[in-house]
Image (spheres, rainbow, N blue to C red):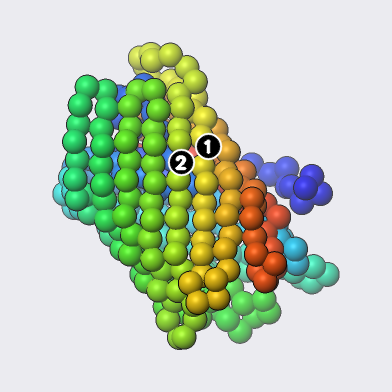
Amino acid sequence: MNKGLFAVLIFSINFIFIQNLNGQGPPITAETPIMLGLEGSGIRTFGRFISTENSKNYVHVIAAPYNFSPKFQMGAIFPFVFKTPKESETVGGFGDMTVFAKYQLYKKDGKAKTFRILARLTQTFPTGKTSSEPPIGNDLYQTYFGLIVGNITSKVGIYGDLGYLVKHANTPDNLVYNFSMGFPLLPQQYPQKQINAFGEFNGNYQLESKINQFFISPGLQWIPGRRFLLESSLQLPLFQDESVNNKVNFRWLIGIRFLFN
């Protein structure tokens, strides 16, 4: 595993809304049920290194969300993909662009706690070039419908999301599921400073081919103030079917999140 790790620090800027819940930040690899606030806006960019059996890849993402109301958010995600197959040169370029929308279905707030349910819809377009080898894009339109649930207190944040990914052009649809628990490691203080530990699980199941992949993703998050955080997560496979092509060795994400207003 050490052989595949890169000693590189990649910053990412991500939209967040951090409530005064003892510095409880959003999950790293799962979806967050917390909006940006009224007319909130932010920028996200994150870097992810991916080591597989046959290649080493890097994906850098730029995302821009915007709240049209306290319950409704839209945004776009722009990925840049760089793939390096074994014994071959790196091929890179703009990947498949995604637009998304979130709508808050339910919210119940209490003293230093909140419970929320959101619906999420995304549409991915085949904007990545497919003429290269390996191809940068999937050459597929992909539509995702899902639910996001979160129960957040000053002591723990529990998050989960479940969704159905429709892949067009007669390719197998996927069931996507994520679960996350976040724990503040420092006592509450003002100005806000916090370190959060996360235990997360990520899964993907192809319905027609019955191929399953399941990962564990431990992570850490540092919050020096209300608008900014630094985080890192290492994703390791717990289970991958033997029929999976080009199995994943690990995925490593590191980034920064920032909220404008």
Picture quarter containing residue 163? Answer: bottom left
- Assign a secondary structure to mark 1: strand
Residue farthest along the left direction in this orientation: 69
Q: Is residue 70 left or right of residue 112?
A: left
- Residue sitting nearer the eye, 17 or 113: 113
**Mark 2 belongs to which amino acid?**
Ser
The answer to the question of whether label 1 and label 2 lie on touching residues, with beta carbons closer than 8 A, is yes
Q: Position of residue 158 (x, y in %)?
A: 39, 36
Residue at position x 38%, y 56% from top?
Answer: 162
- In the rendered structure, find residue 199 and report the number of the disc placed on it: 1
Q: Looking at the image, which is closer to me, 63 or 26?
A: 26
Q: Quadrant of residue 146?
A: bottom left
- Check disc 2 and report the residue beneath it: 180
Which disc is residue 71 wearing? Answer: none
- The residue under the point 45% across, 32% down is 182
Name the residue nearer the viewer: 127 or 238: 238
Mark 1: which amino acid?
A: Gly
Q: Quadrant of residue 13?
A: top left
Q: Is residue 100 above or below residue 156?
A: below
Q: Position of residue 261 (x, y in %)?
A: 27, 38
In the rendered structure, which disc, 1 or 2, sits on the residue that comes first in sequence? 2
Residues at marks 1 and 2, CA–CA distance in whole angstroms: 6 Å
